[in-house]
Amino acid sequence: MTLNMAFTIPRLYCPLSVPDEHPDLDLMEKRGLDWIASRGLASDPVTHRLVANSQSHALLSRLTPSAPAPLVQLGVDLGYLLFTLDDLRTDTGPTSIDTGLLMAWLYDFTYALAVPDAFLPDADPGCSAIAELSRRIRAVTPPEIWHRLIDVLHQSCWSAMWESTQRNLKLTPTFDTYLTARPRFGAAPATLLMAEIAAQLRVPEHEREHPLIRTAFDVSCLLLCLDDDLYSYPKEQWALDKAGRDAAHEPAAIPILMREHNVGVHEAAALLADIRDRLTLLLTRLLTLIKAAPFSPDTMAYVNIAASAVPVGLAWAQECPRFTDPDGRSPGLIELHWAGIHDIPPGNQDPLPYPSIESWWRHAAQPE
């Protein structure tokens, strides 16, 4: 792989519109970065730039552009923290190559999240940060929402353990197995829950778990992460090259598709684009069914936020230096070429042949 990397992202189907920017966008960026620095997580200029490159404020705030800035800030701060920990704990350092060390660190992290008032002597800065943020979220949300956040972040940590185990033991997961883990180690449910908190929604539990609503939410989470698998691919390959790891065993969408279909990088990217296009079409069908059903206004808002994450994620990625400056020192090292985003439905509209998600099409065909 050359020092200067270029990668073309295939044309992607997304007929959903991008919400407006939040009016306090710049202020939330400053507050988020100041908070990360105050927790001791960006103590040098390179790390600060790496954190700033993620532009969490642009991603999180656009999901709820009319929500109160203090509530949106909670999600912005969590986004900056998770991006930082992804870079400093799961991608680099001792915990990135030792699943046991990562497990021990993730346990401390989830303990600090769930028991934020506990005294943690000599706590890792990431654990101290999540404890402080957990207290802030607890203060402004109903108990059941705070506990839901603990649950979804526990799931993210468990899935991160799956990713580490696959990588460090050089296992070969199937793409179907990967689909089950991907949204959680990508923290998509946590991201959307923070948007729900910002919008101050009170979604009835029986509606949240309705097959149409749950499926639309799950499809949105998976799409947000599969799109990330496309535009983050060269960044991840750069990190693998730098660490001397074998890309063939990487538990990521494109390497798995390359192995399963015996194809090259560009063919696998095209396969992934087709998969996400068919999922996007399914999401649009689900939204049509949901709009025709008598769900509560908060449930409708919940679904709309989840679905909007797909175009928001694509718009964010096209401007985000996280994917073109992989180490905070090399702006423009990676050249991402976007072939375009269009609104023409895919020619192949058949359900995808993966057991973990095949029921999604049944829910769309036979709504309850």
Image (tube, helix red, strand yellow):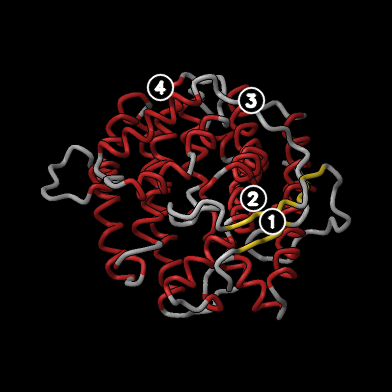
Q: Earlier in the sequence, mark 1 or mark 2?
A: 2
Label pair 2/3, CB-CB below 8 angstroms: no
Q: Nearer the viewer, mark 3 or mark 4?
A: 3
On residue 20, the disc is: 3
Residue 287 in view of the camera: yes
How would you rate the neighbour count of disc 3 (Cα within 10 Å): few for under 14, some for 14-19, many for 20 or more?
Answer: few
Three-letter code for the amino acid on which mark 4 is drawn: Pro
Going from N to C along the chain, the mark reached first, 3 or 1, is 3
Q: Position of residue 74 (x, y in %)?
A: 39, 31
Task: Pick whichever of labels 2 and 4 is earlier in the sequence.
Answer: 4
The reply, left or right, for residue 235 in relation to residue 18 is left
In the picture provided, is 168 more to the left or to the right than 13?
left
Amino acid beneath label 3: Asp
In the rendered structure, are the residues bearing label 1 and label 4 in contact, judged by CB atoms less than 8 Å apart? no
Q: Which mark is residue 223?
A: 2
Q: CA distance from mark 2 to mark 3?
A: 20 Å
Q: Is residue 312 left or right of residue 93?
A: right
Question: Mark 4 — residue?
Answer: 70
Quadrant of the rendered image containing residue 320: top right
Q: Residue 24: image x %, image y %?
A: 49, 21
